[in-house]
Amino acid sequence: MELAAYRIVQEALTNARRHAPGAAVDVELRYTSEALELVISDDGPGPSGAEGHGLTGMRERALAAGGEPGTAQDGAEVVRMCAELKPDVVLMDIRMPVMDGIEATRRLEGGPGS
């Protein structure tokens, strides 16, 4: 599981550098005896509409480690999916329609406005 998490972070950072040069990237890792939770977010322009090999590779790595990856179209959908699925790993853009990634992350962490 640790190697899969490392490779997912590596791919996410590579994607951010390639597709959003200069974007700020935040990586949060929580590792307990029960789970590994990984949240990666950036303030880049968001998805271009076409999914590349990087997202596919991250999804495949999560599956291989026993994860259940999903894809949301906006921040509100991220919050709904996380409430239902209780994921260990969340990869999220900052710029998203309906609710941005910062507000979605706040709500996932149970912060103000959640």
Image: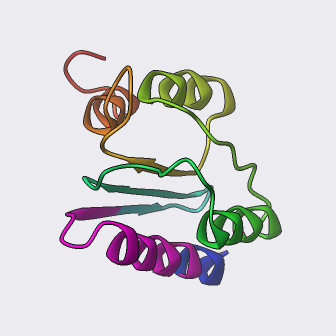
Coordinates of residue 54 in the picture (x, y in percent) = 60, 71
Coordinates of residue 34 in the picture (x, y in percent) = 62, 55
User: Total number of numbered labels?
Assistant: 0
Q: Give the vertical position of 11 relative to 58 (above or below).
A: below
Question: Residue reaching furthest top?
Answer: 113
- Residue drawn at the location 26% of the way across and 37% of the way down: 102
Q: Left or right of 86: which side holds 78?
A: left
In magenta segment, residue 26: yes
Q: Give the vertical position of 95 relative to 66 (above or below).
A: above
Q: Left or right of 49: which side holds 64?
A: right
- Pick the front one: 91 or 54: 54
Q: Left or right of 109: which side holds 10?
A: right
Colour pattern: rainbow
Q: Give the vertical position of 94 relative to 82 (above or below).
A: below
Coordinates of residue 38 in the picture (x, y in percent) = 48, 59
| Image quadrant in which the N terminus is located | bottom right
Q: Left or right of 80: which side holds 47?
A: left
Instruction: Please provide the residue range marked out in magenta.
Output: 7-27
| Image quadrant in which the C terminus is located | top left
Quadrant of residue 27 within the rendered picture: bottom left
- Residue drawn at the location 63% of the way across and 41% of the way down: 71
- Pick the front one: 53 or 86: 53
Q: Give the vertical position of 28 relative to 111 (above or below).
A: below
